[in-house]
Image: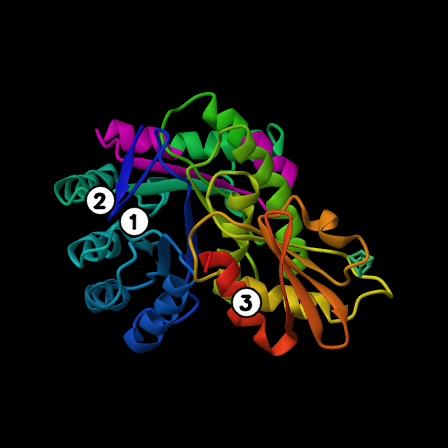
Amino acid sequence: MKVRIGNIVIGDGNPVAIQSMTNTDTKDVERTTTQIKRLESVKVDIVRVSTPDIESARAIKEIKKRVNVPIVADVHFDHRIAIEAIKSGVDKVRINPGNIGADWKVKELATVAKEYEVPIRVGSNTGSLPKDLDGKMERWEALAEAALREVKILEDARFYNIVVAAKSSDAIETIKAYEYIKARIDYPLHIGVTEAGTYESALIKSSFALGYLLYKGIGDTIRISIAGDPTMEVIAARKLLSFLGLRKEPQVIACPTCSRAVFDVEKVAREVEDILFKYDKLITFSVLGCFINGVGEGKHADAGIAGVTGDKMIAFKNGKIYKEFKKEELEKVVQELVNGE
Ligand code: SF4
């Protein structure tokens, strides 16, 4: 099933979209817009903003005028805030109808969301499982059943423009819950490991869980939740999709370095990544600390560089030497290699 979130369509074979979330006060339009623009600069597809009150919901109207990326309002409990966000032009609402209360409130929200063609993301979190499910079955199953319960509430209100998520901080629970849900419903799934932790833990947990699910064809939007700068979430998600062959992006492969390296491989590889970031064509670029194995070591890359001695490097392309150059010419040479000049 397809769902439109602003100018992005997910589900039904459409490309997997990358989400992140601002950590600013949404009422502070200036700071929130600045952060969204930073996320846009690293090619985020969808941005969620916390919407704890009516003022935040109203601020979305101004934010929407200043950014291009679709905005999701993250609302808890109060359907009036969700309705205000929709009327402010938000592209998706994340709210759990099970937390809204009376049926008429759910119906009121569903009616407005339908009128404005705004999808609703529902879901579950291991931190807030319903009491009648928690402890009565395995936690991943309770997580999945809780998400399906939220879906059912919206369906009972004749609302079907739905995205579903089931969040655990455990990678295995995440996998099992999403497999269970995928086997039962056809709505697009937003996948992620919640509270995944600091950079390294978040990367490893999310790469394992999301990598597995995406490889199995499960997941329509992803968030790699990292405690820290949200732009890192987007860059990590882009790399994951690229390594899975789900997004065409430049890739930098770098040798692990050893005593033969004649330059700081990590530093140069990061510089090359930054340069390649400007280009959307699929290119694999190799960064080798030395030229001991000649071009051969980088032959699986489309192009690359290797250290020679002192401040000299060799550039190669399609398995052939392109030219020798000085370190300070790095950016110019990488551009030549990428652009075929
Ligand atoms: Fe060492 Fe050279 Fe191999 Fe890098 S390419 S690991 S520097 S031998």
| Location of residue 36 (image quadrant) | bottom left
In depth, the one of 141 and 258 nearer the eye is 258
Residue assigned mark 3: 333
In space, the residues marked 1 and 3 are separated at their CA atoms by: 46 Å
Which quadrant of the render holds ligand 1? bottom right
In space, the residues marked 1 and 2 are separated at their CA atoms by: 7 Å
The residue carrying pointer 1 sits among few (fewer than 14), some (14 to 19) or many (20 or more) residues within 10 Å by Cα, namely many
- Whichever of labels 1 and 3 marks the residue nearer the N terminus, that label is 1
- Whichever of labels 1 and 2 marks the residue nearer the N terminus, that label is 1
Name the spot of residue 54 as percent of width and height, x first.
24, 64
The residue at the point 37 percent across, 25 percent down is 186
The residue carrying pointer 3 sits among few (fewer than 14), some (14 to 19) or many (20 or more) residues within 10 Å by Cα, namely many
Specify the quadrant that holds the C terminus. bottom left
Residue assigned mark 2: 118
Name the spot of residue 304 as percent of width and height, x first.
62, 57
- In the displayed image of the protein, which residue is found farthest to the right? 259
Residue assigned mark 1: 93
Q: Is residue 197 visible?
A: no
Element assignment for label 3: helix
The span shown in magenta is 150-177
Tell me, yes or no, whether the two marked residues, 2 and 3, touch with CB atoms within 8 Å.
no
Position of 143 with respect to 172 (left or right) is left
